[in-house]
Image (cartoon, grey):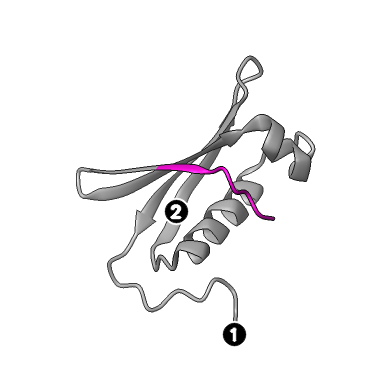
């Protein structure tokens, strides 16, 4: 799974790092055929963090797609404190 056109927005609110990934529904559906789940959202954000070399860990992951919108948004908190180097499932 490789999305070349992800737009990431980040901000910190009340000491919590938050990330929003946005992509077109057309690009998303080329891979996931209209299936929207937190499991898929978790795979996408973890892959995105890995590609960036980001040691943050995503929690509270949610995916949003409205029928009248061509955008898919993935929301997550990104935790850094107390993390070891994140290996994303690799040994």
Residue 91, numbered circle? 1
Count of number-bearing discs: 2
Question: Looking at the rendered structure, which numbered label has been put on residue 59?
Answer: 2
Is 88 above or below relative to 47?
Answer: below
Q: Residues within 10 Å of mark 2 (few under 14, many from 20)?
A: some
Q: Quadrant of the C terminus?
A: bottom right
Residue that appears at 53% across and 43% down:
6
Q: Is residue 62 left or right of residue 9?
A: right
Q: Main secondary structure of the magenta part?
A: loop
65 shown above or below 61: above
Measured as percent of width and height from the top left, residue 15 is found at: 20, 49
Task: Find residue 7 and report its horizontal and vertical position in percent.
Answer: 47, 41
- Name the element at disc 2: strand
* Residue 63 image point, x, y percent: 56, 37
Residue at image coords 53%, 59%: 46
* CB within 8 Å, label 1 to label 2: no
What is the magenta range?
Answer: 1-8
Residue drawn at 52 percent across, 64 percent down: 51
Q: Is residue 27 left or right of residue 57?
A: right
Residue 2 counted in the magenta span? yes
């Amino acid at each position: 799974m490789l999305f070349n056109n992800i737009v990431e927005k980040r901000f910190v609110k009340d000491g919590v790092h938050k990330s929003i990934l946005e992509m077109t529904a057309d690009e998303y559906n080329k891979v996931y055929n209209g299936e929207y789940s937190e499991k898929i959202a978790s795979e996408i954000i973890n892959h995105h963090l890995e590609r960036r070399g980001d040691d943050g860990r995503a929690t509270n992951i949610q995916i949003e797609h409205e029928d009248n919108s061509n955008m898919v948004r993935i929301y997550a908190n990104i935790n850094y404190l107390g993390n070891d180097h994140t290996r994303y499932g690799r040994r």
